[in-house]
Amino acid sequence: RGLFYNQPPFKKRKENRQECVEKFICFRRNKRINYFQEFKVMTDEEIKSKVNQIFMEEFEIPQEKIVPEAEIFTTLGLDSLDIVDLVVALEKVFEVKIKSRESLQQIRTVGDIYQFIIKTRDSLKESQNP
């Protein structure tokens, strides 16, 4: 038996753990596939709305300040640590990985973020529809 009397033997616990991991991965995979299908059909306005929502909820920026021309550092007052939080929030909401450092360095305004996410959506559409 295990270390405590109420625990099953180690081998059985390991098998149960592996089964749970496989179920979780399967659940995550199905959820991710469904989400990508939703993300691929999102309109530009829905993407902009979600990005605005991130700014309002994560950084408590009033909606009036969130316009495409608003500069992230000067107008919205975000710093480099806030940008890390922004990237994490975008990855979480849109379930995409933002890897390209060069493309991130070119983002200066809220409109640039809109265009970046829209381009990501379009590239996903093209990669899944050859």
Image (spheres, grey):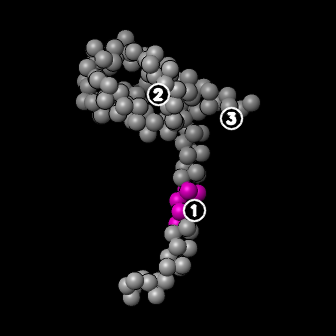
Eyeballing the image, is 128 above or below 114?
below
Quarter of the figure with the C terminus:
top right
Q: Which residue is mark 3?
A: 128
Q: Amino acid at mark 1?
A: Glu
Tell us which disc is closer to us: 3 or 1: 1
Q: Which residue is mark 2?
A: 47
Could you say where residue 90 lies in the image, as x and y percent from the top left? 43, 33
Q: Mark 3 Cα within 10 Å, few/some/many (few <14, many 20+)?
A: few
Labelled pair 3, 1 in contact (Cβ < 8 Å): no
Q: Give the structural element (helix, strand or loop) at label 3.
A: helix
Could you say where residue 91 lies in the image, as x and y percent from the top left? 46, 36
Could you say where residue 39 lies in the image, as x and y percent from the top left? 54, 35
Cα separation between marks 3 and 2: 19 Å
Q: Amino acid at mark 2?
A: Ile
Cα separation between marks 3 and 1: 25 Å
Q: Amino acid at mark 3?
A: Gln
Residue 26: within the magenta? Answer: yes
Residue 51 visible somewhere in the drawing:
yes
What segment carries the magenta color? 20-27
Labelled pair 3, 2 in contact (Cβ < 8 Å): no
Q: Give the structural element (helix, strand or loop) at label 2.
A: helix
Question: Closer to the camera, 117 or 4?
Answer: 4
Name the quadrant containing residue 3.
bottom left
Q: Give the structural element (helix, strand or loop) at label 1.
A: helix
Residue 115: within the magenta? Answer: no
Q: Which residue is mark 1?
A: 22
Which of marks 2 and 3 precedes in the sequence?
Answer: 2
State the residue at coordinates (46%, 16%).
Answer: 106
Tell us which disc is closer to us: 3 or 2: 3
State the residue at coordinates (52%, 66%).
Answer: 20
